[in-house]
Image (cartoon, grey):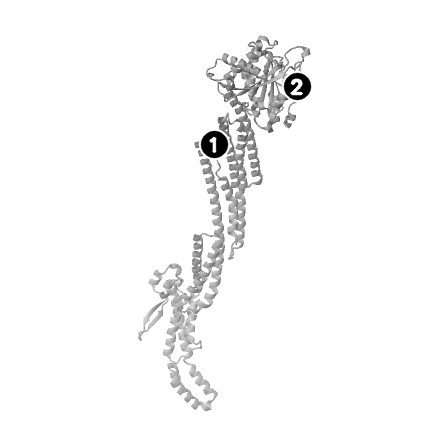
């Protein structure tokens, strides 16, 4: 019932640990045994049995632990059955039994003394419990084999552990072939007495005041005669088994120190110990334990390092395949660092008590190695970001650029520009930020660690700055393109909304106040367009300076459009002046043809018409885009009645041309002089023609009436004459009447 299920997987039967020649051969066997205990824990309890040859040690072990060590067959005679050391699993969890070669054998003779000492030392080092198998008849006999055996045990124990009671082994005395003539308690006292005698013989400094039981746990068990009381012997063997395995574990192990190393390191430790003993080298258990720890530290380090490297390689492959990285990716990568270290730490936890420095150093080495591998991964991620992710970003920007080009000359912008560009920016920039995540750089040298992290930070900042610069330039370029498209639309609308109305209404009027009306119309259109641009600028999150610059361009374009319109008008200025003169001279204010009653009236009309023509010339000589130019077109003169009159001159005064910006000059002074001469000549011709046409009109009227009705000539002539005298002042008419 006490046999653990895990034992079923263990090797069948005992196997050699140390052969008869003293060679260690137990690596494979112990490893298999330990692997069978792997799930039960790290501590291993070992019981080793010592005693004289042919005292029934193997028989006792087989009966108590249900093992199958080779035992002596009495019929074949007394001989050496167990040569070297054998091992097998005991009946409890994580428990091994070592069956050691008996002492005082004739086969080895005097040469066997050293080997016996070596096996005693070996058993004392590796076992928690030493079973000393003695005959009842040997108790109290100083020359008995167990006396020399115990002296060896005490001697090597002092050499290994000193006088400290921190490492305490159990000496389990089993008295064989008990006859019953002496009581059990008495036998125990006799054995303790023998131990005291041996204790006194061992001359060790520091033992003063200490007893055997200060350094050893003592247990006793009495067995009857195997031949004469076999049934009772078997029952006592069962009782011993129950005693040893109460509550599922060997009770004899309670209170005794555990084996020097964890289960996984037992094979290496046992081999190291025996080889030291075999070569008769000084056995320093802390050093041996440290060696085992270092050995398994390298294995654990290799295991965790291989695991970590495989994980990083997997992530590297995913980067190459997906050509993209994300925050979960970096979170996963960072988690590997701690997992890899925890894997090593967990494996080496059982060695921490006696090899803390080894574990600490290897942890630091692993951490540096892992951190460097992480940096390699992050560096590759940065390369992917700067190539593939840049291509993706540039593709998105190119798509938006195409959309903007399709909007050329329209007021529309990309409605979701901000969100779309932000998505593209995040996809490009955020992986760099993920790479910038500060992880706990695991390094022993703080200065070196800081140096590495500072260099990494510098590189990341350099990459981040470069990418942010690319993104910023792309954003500004897209915004500029959209503002440019909106601006082109605004220019078109400005031209469209100003050209026809100004030509048809404002400039067609050719009156004082024309330029103020033009400025007001221009300002209204400009303000509407500027509001539109600001609204679109907000929609695309344009910088205020860029929007203000675009608005300023609208002002400039508005002025240019105005100059363009009036410039085309000024090219036909001579004709406009002539038309203005003709209209003013030949028609009255109501638009009807004029009839002059006197030469004075004709002259006044002539002068007024000339002023009208000159007014047109003056108004279109300089573009009145600013209000301070309104007074350059005319001069105020005071008439006899004290009223101010506006007298227009064409060309304008020379000082006016000198004061006005050249871009506002529509007709230069030289051009105006030439146009004035042509205008004066035209006006004079119109005046002369008007004189010639208007004066003989009444004479013709009189003649027509005379020829139509000669009989009534006297009456009609008198009437017309009377009319001419009263209404017509033209000299030619008066001469005609006289004629």
Closer to the observer: label 2 or label 1? Answer: 2
Please give left or right for residue 234 compared with residue 566 in the image.
right
**Which of the two residues, 459 or 201, is positioned nearer the viewer here?**
201
Q: CA distance from mark 2 to mark 1?
A: 63 Å
Q: Position of residue 512 (x, y in %)?
A: 39, 69
Figure label count: 2
Q: Residues within 10 Å of mark 1 (few under 14, many from 20)?
A: many
**Which of the two residues, 639 or 729, is positioned nearer the viewer here?**
639
Which residue in the structure is indicated by mark 1? 443
Q: Is residue 118 above or below residue 552?
A: above
Dots 2 and 1: beta carbons under 8 Å?
Answer: no
Which residue is pictured at 35% across the width and 70% down the height?
647
Q: Residues within 10 Å of mark 2 (few under 14, many from 20)?
A: some
Q: Position of residue 709 (x, y in %)?
A: 47, 89
Is label 2 in a helix, a strand or a loop? Answer: helix
Which residue in the structure is indicated by mark 2? 234
**Which of the two residues, 287 or 66, is positioned nearer the viewer here?**
66
Pick the quarter of the image with the N terminus.
top right
Q: Is residue 226 visible?
A: yes
Residue 320's tag is none
Q: Is residue 31 visible?
A: no
**Which of the two residues, 162 or 599, is positioned nearer the viewer here?**
162
Q: Position of residue 689 (x, y in %)?
A: 41, 75
């Amino acid at each position: 019932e006490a046999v653990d299920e895990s034992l079923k997987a263990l090797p069948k039967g005992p196997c050699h640990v140390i052969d008869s020649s003293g060679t260690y051969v137990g690596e494979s066997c112990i490893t298999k045994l330990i692997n069978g205990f792997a799930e039960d824990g790290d501590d291993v309890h070992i019981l080793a049995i010592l005693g004289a040859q042919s005292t029934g040690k193997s028989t006792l072990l087989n009966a108590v632990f249900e093992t199958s060590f080779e035992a002596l067959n009495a019929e074949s005679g007394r001989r050496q059955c167990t040569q070297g050391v054998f091992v097998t699993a005991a009946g409890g969890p994580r428990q091994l039994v070592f069956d050691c070669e008996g002492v005082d054998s004739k086969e080895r003779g005097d040469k066997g003394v050293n080997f016996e000492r070596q096996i005693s030392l070996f058993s004392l080092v590796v076992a928690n419990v030493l079973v000393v198998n003695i005959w009842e008849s040997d108790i109290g006999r100083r020359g008995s084999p167990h006396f020399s055996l115990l002296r060896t045990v005490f001697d090597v124990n002092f050499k290994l552990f000193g006088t400290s009671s921190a490492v305490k082994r159990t000496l389990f005395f089993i008295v064989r072939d008990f006859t019953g003539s002496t009581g059990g308690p008495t036998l125990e006292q006799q054995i303790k007495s023998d131990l005291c005698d041996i204790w006194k013989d061992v001359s060790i400094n520091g033992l003063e005041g200490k007893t055997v039981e200060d350094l050893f746990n003592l247990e006793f068990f009495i067995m009857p005669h195997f031949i004469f009381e076999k049934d009772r012997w078997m029952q006592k063997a069962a009782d011993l088994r129950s005693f040893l395995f109460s509550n599922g574990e060997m009770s004899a192990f309670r209170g005794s120190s555990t084996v020097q190393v964890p289960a996984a390191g037992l094979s290496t430790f046992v081999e190291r110990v025996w080889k030291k003993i075999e070569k008769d080298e000084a056995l320093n258990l802390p050093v041996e334990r440290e060696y085992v720890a270092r050995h398994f530290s390298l294995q654990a380090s290799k295991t965790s390092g291989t695991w970590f490297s495989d994980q990083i390689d997997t992530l590297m492959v995913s980067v190459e395949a997906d050509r993209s990285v994300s925050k979960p990716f970096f979170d996963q990568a960072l988690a590997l660092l701690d997992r890899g270290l925890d894997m090593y730490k967990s494996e080496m936890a059982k060695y921490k008590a006696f090899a803390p420095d080894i574990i600490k150093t290897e942890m630091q080495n692993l951490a540096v190695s892992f951190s460097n591998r992480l940096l390699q991964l992050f560096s590759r991620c940065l390369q992917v970001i700067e190539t593939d992710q840049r291509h993706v970003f540039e593709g998105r920007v190119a798509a938006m650029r195409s959309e903007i080009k399709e909007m050329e000359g329209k007021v529309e912008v990309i409605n979701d520009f901000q969100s779309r560009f932000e998505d593209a920016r995040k996809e490009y920039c955020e992986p760099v930020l993920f790479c910038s995540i500060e992880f706990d750089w695991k390094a022993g040298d703080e200065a070196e660690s800081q140096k590495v992290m500072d260099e990494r930070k510098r590189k990341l900042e350099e990459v981040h700055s470069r990418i942010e610069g690319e993104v910023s330039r792309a954003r500004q370029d897209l915004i500029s393109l959209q503002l440019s498209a909106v601006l082109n639309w605004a220019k078109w609308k400005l031209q469209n909304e100003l050209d026809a109305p100004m030509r048809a209404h404002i400039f067609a009027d050719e009156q004082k106040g024309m330029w103020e009306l033009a400025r007001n119309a221009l300002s209204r259109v400009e303000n509407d367009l500027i509001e539109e641009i600001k609204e679109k600028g907000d929609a695309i999150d344009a910088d205020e300076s860029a929007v203000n610059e675009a608005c300023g361009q609208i002002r400039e374009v508005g002025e240019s459009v105005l100059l363009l319109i009036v410039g085309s008008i000024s090219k036909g200025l001579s004709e406009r002046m002539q038309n203005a003169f003709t209209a003013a001279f030949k028609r009255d204010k109501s638009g009807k043809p004029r009839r002059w009653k006197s030469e004075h009236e004709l002259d006044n009309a002539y002068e007024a018409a000339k002023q009208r023509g000159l007014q047109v010339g003056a108004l279109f000589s300089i573009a009145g885009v600013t209000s301070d130019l309104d007074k350059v077109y005319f001069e105020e003169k005071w008439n006899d009645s004290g009223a101010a009159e506006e007298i227009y001159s064409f060309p304008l005064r020379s000082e006016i041309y000198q004061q006005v910006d050249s871009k506002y000059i529509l007709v230069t002074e030289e051009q105006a002089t030439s146009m004035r001469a042509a205008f004066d000549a035209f006006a004079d011709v119109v005046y002369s023609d008007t004189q010639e046409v208007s004066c003989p009109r009444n004479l013709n009227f009189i003649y027509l009436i005379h020829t139509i009705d000669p009989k009534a000539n006297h009456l009609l002539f008198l009437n017309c004459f009377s009319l001419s005298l009263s209404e017509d002042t033209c000299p030619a008419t008066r001469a005609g009447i006289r004629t």
